[in-house]
Amino acid sequence: MKKSFISLHARTYAHATEDLGKVKLAFTNALGSIETKTTRTDGHHGNPITVLEAETTDARAIGEFFGRLSKEDLKALLATIDERIDDGCNLFLRLDKQAAYEGVVRLGGGEDVISVRIKVGAFPSRREIAKDIVRTFAHEDLSKRGERSER
């Protein structure tokens, strides 16, 4: 895989009311074998919160992450690309943490998510170039899966 993506950073939170083991499993299901760092902090009201974070620059691991997304989610990513890439060429995804626990990696919303930021290797570093790179990557991925996508 050519170096379309420079890095992937993911973060989620395990609140005191959640089973930390289940949250770790959801995180691993979503990200694969990327090493996870765990830190503990306190919430606004003093409640304990565990922060799980993972980061990689390994192109293969990033490609495998995209491979966990369904064809429908890749199409949704394409349809919402303008809202997902910032001026710093970062692609932002939110994954459904409950679904990830069950082994299904899909886009999600709300507060109970795994937040993923992927730095796109756009040179020169421009938002439009980053959007084109992600579009091309998603279209190629869909083609490999035997799925047509609209350009």
Image (spheres, rainbow, N blue to C red):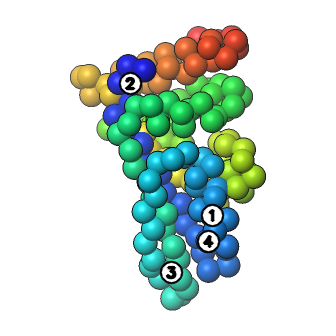
Q: Is residue 88 left or right of residue 25?
A: left
Q: Residue at x 59, y 62 (%)?
A: 24
Between tags 2 and 4, which lies in front?
4
- Is disc 1 in contact with disc 4, using a CB cutoff of under 8 Å? yes
**Sequence-first tag of 2 and 4:** 2
Of all residues shown, which one is farthest toward the left?
124
In the image, 150: left or right of 118? right
Residue 93 numbered tag: none
Q: Which residue is mark 4?
A: 20
Where residue 116 sits in the image (x, y, percent)?
49, 47
Q: Residues within 10 Å of mark 1 (few under 14, many from 20)?
A: many
- In the rendered structure, which amino acid carries the disc numbered 4? Leu
Amino acid at circle 3: Gly
The mark that comes first in sequence, 3 or 4, is 4
Q: Residue furthest bottom?
A: 46
Between residues 57 and 97, which one lies in front from this camera angle? 57
Give the class, few, some or many, for how many residues have Cα within 10 Å of label 2's Cα (few <14, many ≥20). some
Q: Residue at x 54, y 33 (%)?
A: 64
State the SS at label 2: loop
Q: Disc 2 versus disc 4: distance between alpha carbons?
A: 33 Å
Which residue bears the numbered disc 3? 43
Mark sitting earlier along the chain (2/1): 2
Report how far apart the C-alphas of labels 2 and 1 lie in the structure: 29 Å
